[in-house]
Image (tube, grey):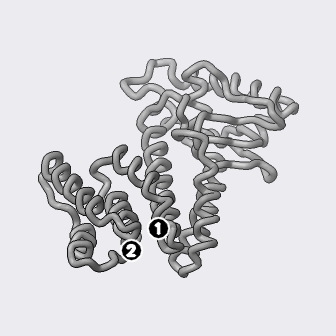
């Protein structure tokens, strides 16, 4: 069974889709899919489905949704509901667990695997391999995570973490491209990212480096000026020391150097 959460929710096999369209059952399946292979406590399911106070019948409703999901999974996998209850969506005594099976593909797991490989390659200076691995990780995304699912606090936290991981991998892929001398090709992409997130210092620093290395130091300095102004206006702070160092290198006529961010 294949599970996709890096975009609209997909849970299915051989082109057959098991995800229901009704909001609450779909949200429940998304919670299980986001933690596929792990037990999700019933209390957590209830909290996410009814953030502002569960009804007295919440446990019964969850059980009803599980029955519906098991039937849908059975039809999709072309097995009995009993087999689904035992092996695909079992109850453990305190929670439910969605098991994709040995042959199942999970896009979030593939993303994490390629990301980790790319991170190690980047740290080791193998920029060509890092670019490929990180690119493969980004290709797993089909849109915003769980784009078509109603989210409560648990799913929101999971989705936020996934989107942050995606941003980090994108920055690392851009760093690999910079090390490979692709600064000209990166300007358009980085300019768009800087517009999308005007407070993102690392993206702005990469844009400054790309512009300067492309023979456009004046635009690099203007990028710093806009960032400085925005940070002052929105947060009351100055750019980080790393961004300021890049600014000083550009002012002095030196080629700005790419410095890796400290690991989280």
Q: Quadrant of the C terminus?
A: bottom left
* Residue at 55 percent of width and 23 percent of height: 24
Q: Residues within 10 Å of mark 2 (few under 14, many from 20)?
A: some
Residue 56 is left or right of residue 243, and the answer is: right
Residue 64 is left or right of residue 216, and the answer is: right
Which of disc 1 and disc 2 is earlier in sequence?
1
Secondary structure type for disc 1: helix
Residue 76 is left or right of residue 237, and the answer is: right
In the rendering, at what x and y percent does residue 99 appear? 71, 45
- Compared to residue 64, the image places residue 85 above or below, namely below
Q: Are marks 2 and 1 in contact (CB under 8 Å)?
A: yes
Q: Which mark is residue 133?
A: none
* Residue at 60 percent of width and 19 percent of height: 22
* Residue at 52 percent of width and 39 percent of height: 144
Is 57 or 26 nearer to us in this picture?
Answer: 26
- Compared to residue 221, the image places residue 97 above or below, namely above
Secondary structure type for disc 2: loop
- Compared to residue 234, the image places residue 210 above or below, namely below
Q: Is residue 95 visible?
A: no
Residue that label 1 marks: 175
Is 121 or 128 nearer to us in this picture?
Answer: 128
* Residue at 37 percent of width and 72 percent of height: 262
In the rendering, at what x and y percent does residue 127 appear? 56, 74
User: Which residue is most to the front?
Assistant: 215
Q: Is residue 236 visible?
A: yes
In the rendering, at what x and y percent does residue 191 appear? 38, 51
- Compared to residue 38, the image places residue 67 above or below, namely above
Q: Residues within 10 Å of mark 1 (few under 14, many from 20)?
A: many
Q: Which mark is residue 258?
A: 2
Mark 2 and mark 1: Cα distance apart in space: 8 Å
Q: Quadrant of residue 110?
A: bottom right
């Amino acid at each position: 069974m294949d599970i996709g959460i890096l975009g609209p929710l997909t849970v299915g096999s051989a082109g057959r889709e098991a995800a229901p369209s009704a909001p609450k059952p779909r949200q429940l399946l998304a919670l299980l899919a986001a933690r596929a292979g792990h037990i999700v406590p019933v209390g957590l399911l209830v909290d996410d489905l009814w953030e502002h106070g569960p009804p007295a019948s919440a446990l019964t409703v969850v059980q009803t949704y599980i029955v519906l999901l098991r039937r849908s999974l059975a039809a999709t996998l072309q097995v009995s509901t009993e087999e689904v209850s035992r092996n695909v969506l079992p109850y453990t005594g305190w929670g439910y667990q969605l098991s994709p099976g040995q042959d199942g593909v999970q896009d979030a797991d593939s993303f994490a695997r390629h990301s980790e490989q790319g991170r190690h390659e980047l740290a080791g200076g193998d920029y060509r391999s890092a670019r490929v691995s990180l690119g493969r990780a980004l290709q797993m995304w089909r849109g915003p995570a769980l784009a078509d699912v109603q989210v409560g606090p648990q799913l929101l936290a999971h989705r936020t973490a996934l989107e942050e991981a995606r941003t980090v991998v994108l920055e690392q892929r851009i760093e690999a491209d910079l090390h490979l001398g692709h600064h000209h090709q990166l300007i358009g992409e980085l300019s768009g990212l800087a517009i999308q997130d005007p407070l993102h210092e690392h993206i702005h620093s990469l844009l400054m480096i790309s512009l300067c290395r492309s023979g456009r130091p004046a635009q690099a300095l203007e990028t710093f000026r806009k960032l400085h102004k925005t940070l002052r206006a929105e947060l009351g702070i100055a750019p980080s020391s790393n961004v300021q160092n890049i600014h000083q290198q550009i002012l002095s006529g030196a080629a700005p150097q790419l410095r890796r961010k400290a690991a989280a």
